[in-house]
Image (spheres, helix red, strand yellow):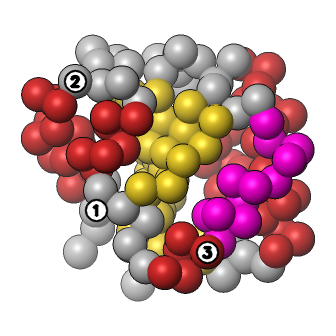
Amino acid sequence: MPDIYRYSILKDIGLIIQYHQNNITKNKMQQLKSDIINDKDFDPKFGFIVDLRNANINLTEDELLEYGNWVKENVKLKGLMRIVLLTSTPDHVAKTILFTLNENISPLQYKTFSTVEASIRWLNIDNCHLDYVTRAIEKLFVD
């Protein structure tokens, strides 16, 4: 199966969804984040969900830290502040915690959640949009 890197910008509710499926590499993650930042609909005030639930995070600790530093340098300049890491396995949680503890990425605010509902709540998106966000994420899946 191919490695999938996709995103969707939901301007009407102020949300960006970054979706990964199968294997993740640091370079491809950086390219996707660059594409998002340079999208005409990107707004640094939007919340951000990085969906890792269908991904294999095979990055080393050093790669995770390098990516965190890269995000800080490239996204901070655009003002992005709140990012959710959506996970599904204990391994995901462990790796995302390592990523979020990287002191070099502050003042960006990262939280790890296992549900879309908790994610949007933390991003201050009204729960009435839960189905809309869930459907938007599902559209990024590849069977």
Neighbours of disc 2 within 10 Å: few (<14), some (14-19), many (20+): few
Q: Is residue 83 left or right of residue 2?
A: right
Which tag, 2 or 3, sits closer to the chain's start?
3
- Residue type, numbered disc 2: Asp
Which quarter of the image is occupied by the N terminus?
bottom left
Q: Nearer the viewer, mark 2 or mark 1?
A: 2
When the figure is inspected, residue 113 is found, relative to residue 74, above or below; the finding is: below
Tag on residue 141?
1
- What residue type is disc 3 on? Ala
Q: Which x, y percent locates residue 99?
A: 72, 59
- Residue 105 sits in quarter: top right
Expressed as whole percent of the image width and height from the top left, the position of residue 25 reads 68, 70
Against 51, residue 82 (above or below) is above
Q: Position of residue 45 (x, y in %)?
A: 53, 15
Residue type marked 1: Phe
Q: Which residue is mark 2?
A: 126
Label 1 sits on a secondary structure element that is loop
Residue at the image position 30 percent from the left and 25 percent from the top: 125
Taking the spot 87% from the left edge, 58% from the top edge, the residue there is: 66
Q: Is residue 93 above or below residue 73?
A: below
Would you name the residue on which mark 3 appears? Answer: 94
- Which callout, 1 or 3, points to the residue nearer the camera? 3
- Image-quadrant location for residue 107: top right
Does the image show residue 70? no
Earlier sequence position, callout 2 versus callout 1: 2
Query: In the image, what residue occupies the spot 86% across and 47% down?
Result: 103
The crowding category of the residue bearing disc 3, from other C-alpha atoms within 10 Å (few below 14, some 14 to 19, many at least 20), is few
From mark 2 to mark 3, how far is it between C-alphas? 28 Å
The spot of residue 51 in percent (x, y) is 43, 56
Q: Residue at x 72, y 66 (%)?
A: 98
- Segment colored magenta: 95-106
N-terminal label among 1 and 3: 3
